[in-house]
Image (spheres, grey):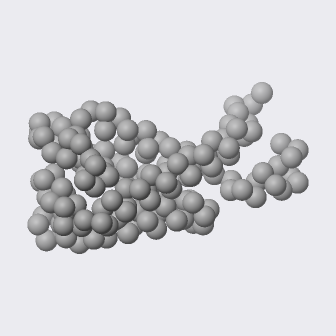
Amino acid sequence: MKLRNFPSPIAPVIAIFFRLFLSFLFFYAAFEKIADPQEFAVTIYNYQILPNFALNLLAVTLPWLEVFLAVCLFLGIYVRGASFLSSLLFLTFATALSINLVRGLDISCGCFGKSSESINWFYLVRDFTLFLMSLFVFFFNRGWRHFFSPSSASK
């Protein structure tokens, strides 16, 4: 068995599962933030990373970017771009969490709006896991057509 053929049979199935999971996660996270953009702006401010002029812009645009990513991942359109952007977002979130965990700040994560708790090392592991899931989708997603095409039956 060749190593390059190893992920071939199961990888597309896992990629679709990850894609749908990430889609639902982005939908949930976005709608919580869209419901109260002012509180989300305060959460971003508490991270003490961005300049003040960027806070409101990010608080308004980030949730809609998450909705866009959720739609793309769910419908299977622009999946490579959406999963790449998703991986960048999770890497950015992990970086922001790392900075503030090292600083020792006791702030809300802000990941899911009001239902978010204080940041901790588990959230960093979670964001890194979601980053890896996004990368997996980027590299191994073949879409639904892969399962129904005649050429995939022989693989």
Q: Is residue 95 above or below residue 88?
A: above
Q: Give the total number of marks visible in the rendering.
A: 0
Q: Is residue 148 above or below residue 9?
A: below
Residue drawn at x 82%, y 55% as measured from the top left: 148
Q: Is residue 97 above or below residue 85?
A: above
Residue drawn at x 70%, y 33% as measured from the top left: 6
Kindly give the residue lying farthest to the top in the view shown: 1
Asked if residue 60 lies left or right of residue 23, the reply is left
Looking at this view, is 31 or 11 the one in front? 31
**Could you tell me if residue 99 is visible in this image?**
no
Q: Which of the image's four quarters has the C terminus? A: top right
Asked if residue 9 lies left or right of residue 34, the reply is right
Q: Which of the image's four quarters has the N terminus? A: top right
Residue drawn at x 41%, y 62% as measured from the top left: 66
Give the percent coordinates (x, y) of residue 29. Answer: 37, 56
Looking at this view, is 103 or 40 the one in front? 40
Give the percent coordinates (x, y) of residue 60. Answer: 27, 71
Residue drawn at x 38%, y 69% as measured from the top left: 64
**Could you tell me if residue 31 is visible in this image?**
yes
Looking at this view, is 115 or 72 the one in front? 115
Give the percent coordinates (x, y) of residue 8. Answer: 72, 40
